[in-house]
């Protein structure tokens, strides 16, 4: 088994998409795994400190509630090596390549003034990865460009200053991991920062799940085979079918959108129930979550210190 690394940014409440696309696959792969709450990444745009802390606490507890009990869990800000190495990598990156980052262009579009950290974010992400020397980095297609940049920076550093970094292989997640779309805008990814009416939050109680799914956008097809997957022409129905399958349900015999939505609601509620139950127990005992993350951060500090030290030495520090 090769080392793996995954970070979730606490920029909002985690959704069914975060669960099916990240947390559930992470829970199935915990040997030599480092899973972090990337709180530093949640500060690249205007943020509220109290909300950041609340989202980070919720994300940390949800890591445990979704069964991540064998991986090393940590908060990025508790492992200073992330910010340290990010600066060293900024000294290797160029403004030209950071300017080409799609995420910077998109989030900065039409905005007079953006935080410098939005621009330098890819260097921090490169540091996140290179510090742990993972052989492979599983990424969604939207993060491909960042991981490619990480490889470029590591290769450039190694060539210019000496072999310090392991060059990670990018593996695009094509293992059937569900990509969950927004219920109201089914051509957009369900995201934690979007309109909550189209996103099912992991901690939404059953009646809220029911209401959100009931309002999900479908189409005006009323034919006998209306309930079928066809991503281009029927994105809403396809998304509901994907969610149903990912939550262990079946659309066999379902011919109406009303019945489909009821089946989706039941499957989602059943899938989330054990997570929510465990979350409630953990919320009653926050010191347990804190101690797991403190031990994880201590381990991360140990693992990452030699990498920072080697980079510093190579650079002449
Ligand atoms: P994000 O929340 O956008 O920072 O994404 C963190 C990770 O969660 C991504 O790399 C995805 O693997 C996963 N993820 C987030 N939203 C979704 C979604 N709607 N569908 C599938 N996976 C998702």
Image (cartoon, grey):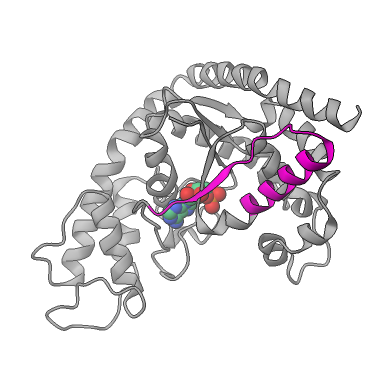
Does 173 lie within the magenta span? Answer: yes
| Residue shown at 31% from the left, 61% from the top | 213
Q: Quadrant of residue 243 in the image?
A: bottom left
Q: Is residue 6 left or right of residue 238?
A: right
Query: Does any portion of residue 48 appear in the rendered image?
Result: no
Q: Nearer the viewer, residue 225 or 289?
A: 225
Residue bounds of the magenta highlight: 146-174
| Residue shown at 71% from the left, 50% from the top | 152
- Count of marks overlaid on the render: 0
**Can you give x and y, in whole percent of width and height, for residue 249 in the image?**
19, 52
Residue at the right extreme of this rendering: 316
Q: Is residue 108 left or right of residue 258?
A: right
| Quadrant of the rendering where the C terminus is positioned | top right
| Residue shown at 79% from the left, 32% from the top | 84
Residue 297 sits above or below residue 147 on the image: above
**Can you give x and y, in whole percent of width and height, for residue 274 in the image?**
29, 34
Residue 258 sits above or below residue 57 on the image: below
**Can you give x and y, in whole percent of width and height, for residue 33 in the image?**
49, 29
Q: Is residue 88 left or right of residue 209?
A: right
Residue at the left extreme of this rendering: 253
Query: Does any portion of residue 278 appear in the rendered image?
Result: yes
Does 168 lie within the magenta span? Answer: yes
Q: Nearer the viewer, residue 32 or 237?
A: 32
């Amino acid at each position: 088994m090769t080392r793996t690394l995954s970070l979730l940014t606490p920029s909002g409440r985690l959704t069914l998409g975060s669960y099916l696309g990240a947390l559930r696959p992470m829970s199935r792969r915990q040997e030599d795994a480092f899973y972090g709450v990337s709180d530093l990444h949640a500060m690249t745009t205007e943020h509220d400190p109290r909300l950041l802390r609340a989202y980070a606490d919720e994300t940390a507890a949800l890591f445990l509630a979704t069964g991540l009990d064998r991986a090393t869990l940590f908060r990025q800000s508790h492992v200073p090596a992330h910010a340290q190495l990010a600066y060293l990598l900024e000294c290797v990156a160029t403004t030209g390549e950071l300017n080409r980052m799609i995420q910077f262009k998109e989030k900065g579009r039409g905005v007079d003034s953006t935080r410098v950290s939005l621009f330098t974010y890819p260097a921090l992400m490169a540091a996140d990865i290179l510090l742990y020397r993972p052989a492979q980095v599983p990424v969604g297609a939207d993060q491909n460009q960042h991981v490619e940049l990480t490889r470029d920076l590591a290769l450039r550093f190694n060539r210019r200053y000496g072999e310090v970094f392991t060059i990670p292989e990018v593996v695009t997640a094509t293992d059937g991991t569900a990509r969950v779309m927004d219920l109201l805008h089914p051509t957009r990814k369900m995201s934690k920062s979007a309109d909550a009416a189209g996103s099912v939050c992991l901690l939404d109680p059953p009646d809220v799940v029911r209401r959100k799914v009931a309002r999900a956008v479908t189409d005006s097809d009323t034919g006998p085979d209306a309930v079928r997957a066809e991503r281009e022409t029927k994105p809403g129905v396809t998304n509901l079918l994907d969610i149903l399958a990912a939550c262990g349900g079946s659309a066999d015999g379902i011919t109406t959108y009303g019945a489909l939505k009821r089946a989706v609601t039941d499957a989602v509620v059943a899938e989330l129930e054990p997570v929510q139950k465990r979350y409630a127990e953990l919320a009653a005992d926050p010191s347990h979550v804190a101690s797991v993350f403190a031990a994880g951060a201590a381990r991360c500090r140990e693992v990452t210190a030699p990498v920072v030290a080697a980079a510093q030495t190579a650079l002449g520090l």
